[in-house]
Amino acid sequence: MKKIGTLVFFCLMLFMLPSLSHASAGLHLYLNGVSLSPSAEAQMIKSTTMIPIRVVVEELGFQVDWNKKTRTVTIHNDKKTIELVVSQKWATVNGKKVNLDVAPIIKSDTTLVPLRFVGETMGLVVDWENETKSVYLFTSDFGSEVTQPKPPVTQPDPDQGGSTGTGESKVEEIQTMSFEDNRLIIGVSKGDLKPTQQRLTGPDRIVVDIPNSKFSDAFSKTQNFASSGQAEFIVQDHPVVEKIRYSQYSDNPATVRVVIDMKQSQNFSVYTTKDPNTVVVDLNGSSPDPGTDTGTGTLPPHSGKYIVVIDAGHGAKDPGAISIKKRNEKDFNLAQALKVAEVFKNDPDVEIILTRTDDTFLELKERVAFAKQHHADLFVSIHANSINKSSISGTETYYSRDDESKAFAQVMHNNLVKGTRLPDRGVRKQSLHVTRETNMPASLLEVGYLTNQTDESALYQEDFQYRVAQSIKDGIKQYLGLKS
Amino acid sequence: MKKTILVLSTLLLTIAIAAGCGQKSADPQPGDQTEVVQPAEQTLRIQSFYTDDQILNLVPKDTEIKFSDAKAKYLTALKTLQQTDDEKLIALWDKSEFLSATLKDDGALTIDVKIPEDAHLGASGEDLALQALLKTSFQFDEVKTVDILVDGKSVDSLMGHVELEHPFSRN
């Protein structure tokens, strides 16, 4: 209990940090908001903060071995082992070689190691504040444990390291991640998660921890996690945001960390929404005190553009139908969806978001959740048809909900058949998951029959796909009342 | 208080004995039955479901199934969905395989299917194929629920357009 109290205190300290220390000649080190002893003797070398290995042991609590012969420093805890060699600009982390900006050095009989590298590798958050020449270090349990209010009565568990089954059942899933309209939108399986946020400088970045969460299997499959356990995507041509990185920061308690690397400092707010369940990091609003604004709210209407989710059907393990020439439906669907996004590029009114941009698989409900989480105005699923009768040919458009989708499906179909130039097999109502469970006008396009020779050879041609993409664009614009 | 416990435990004991006896006397019965019942072939007229060449509607058609073991009834019925003599109709399950169809005492029918990739249908084809399977199964009054497995696994969807319920109930 005392520990929680202390952590809460640390948490408060976090918000007070900027006013804590005033610039002076030396460097200041803080661990979880508490100043380390002035004898820490950190130094700057080529704008990298170096600390004596003694500090690593005494203040940060890691185990350190020093081999005088090989001049090797080994720093380890139960999970990670770092080996650094004096004057070598590389190190190994659990046996894997990584490059360093600055090599460890010996100065007046003290071995100095790069603080950020050591700290971050060992799981600390390292924040440099230039004005005050201060380094703020935070332990991983600092952020996440505070936000995980454990009823003290039911938590007499002294076994802190072991994974107890109790917490696992409550772990929620991170399902989607996208950046649009100056917002990072993280789709989650439950609405009332309690994200914590930190704003760090040098370089500027925003760190959001989502306690009690892990990446869903489906999401993980679509991501390229590096060996460090981190995946990232680059936000193209954004004035402020460089890229977004995320990882399973901690397994116990399960915590997902998302870092937005910024080109410059920017005010932001973090909030959660329910149905769709999201955690939003919003760079639009200038919150007066970004340190404390972990409030809940609803997603404000997106500024200006209509959001249209284009869903390429099937993917990865699910090839969809197999064409008469043994080509996969999933490949047509993706190529066609990508072309729709392409013809909409730089459109002033419509923003296209794709459920998948490569050969990955999403369950039907994940496609629906994706559209809801992005607050899509329209949803279009792209498919190609198949039936065991090769004479059947043509274009069909499906919808499920009369009130919301019938008119949309009709407009889409009228345009689509002009694009495909295949027989018009009509607009059909059918109970399909993605068109039924979405809550915006939704249609599913069966562009043509892969089991028909004429349709099949057309569908895999570039010019056909561009023509269809343009017809889909025309349909969307017509339905939205926009000039095409 | 003590009296209540005594009464209760007596009651429980009685139930336990009764249940035990029931089981014992029931046990030999199935054995007797198999001796008595000849493996005579049964013929049954059922409805099988297909679609029209517009792939718009489910079309029922009377078919005849023959089976000797009562347990084989459901699998035999489902296999009628794999072909039809009627040229105007399309058999939606022609390239798929029905591996098993087992009915439990509580009316839960579990159907295990194999769907090769080249049997994947479009949106309406999948929906109609699913409806055909369910209607064919639920025409037997004793079937209360239908759970469809693909290669023994409980999956979200057969062909990626329509979700499966595990199990489907008679509506």
Image (cartoon, rainbow, N blue to C red):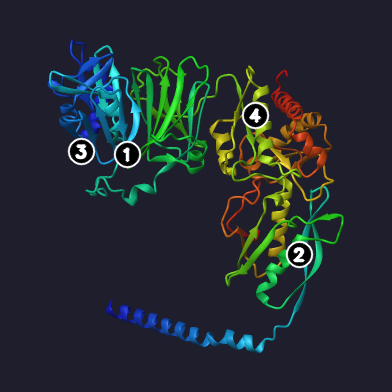
- Are the residues flagged by discs 4 and 1 from a single subunit? yes
- Are the residues flagged by discs 4 and 3 from a single subunit? yes
Which one is earlier in the sequence, the residue at label 1 or at label 3? 3
Q: Is residue A443 visible?
A: no
Question: Image quadrant for the N terminus of chain B?
Answer: bottom left
**Could you tell me which secondary element the residue under label 2 belongs to?**
helix
- The Cα–Cα distance between marks 4 and 1, rounded to whole angstroms, is 41 Å
In this image, A453 relative to A15: left or right?
A: right
Q: Nearer the viewer's eye, disc 4 or disc 3?
A: 4
Residue name at image x 32 percent, y 42 percent = A252
Q: Which mark is residue A148?
A: 1
Question: Which image quarter: residue A386?
Answer: top right
Which one is earlier in the sequence, the residue at label 4 or at label 3? 3
- Mark 4 chain: A
Residue name at image x 71 percent, y 52 percent = B119
Residue name at image x 28 percent, y 45 percent = A151
The crowd level at tag 4 (other Cα within 10 Å; few <14, some 14-19, many 20+) is many
The residue identified by callout 4 is A338
Amino acid carrying mark 1 in the image: Gln
- Mark 2 chain: B
Foreground: B56 or A87?
A: A87
**Could you tell me which secondary element the residue under label 3 belongs to?**
helix
The crowd level at tag 3 (other Cα within 10 Å; few <14, some 14-19, many 20+) is few
- Are the residues flagged by discs 1 and 3 from a single subunit? yes
In this image, A408 relative to A292: left or right?
A: right
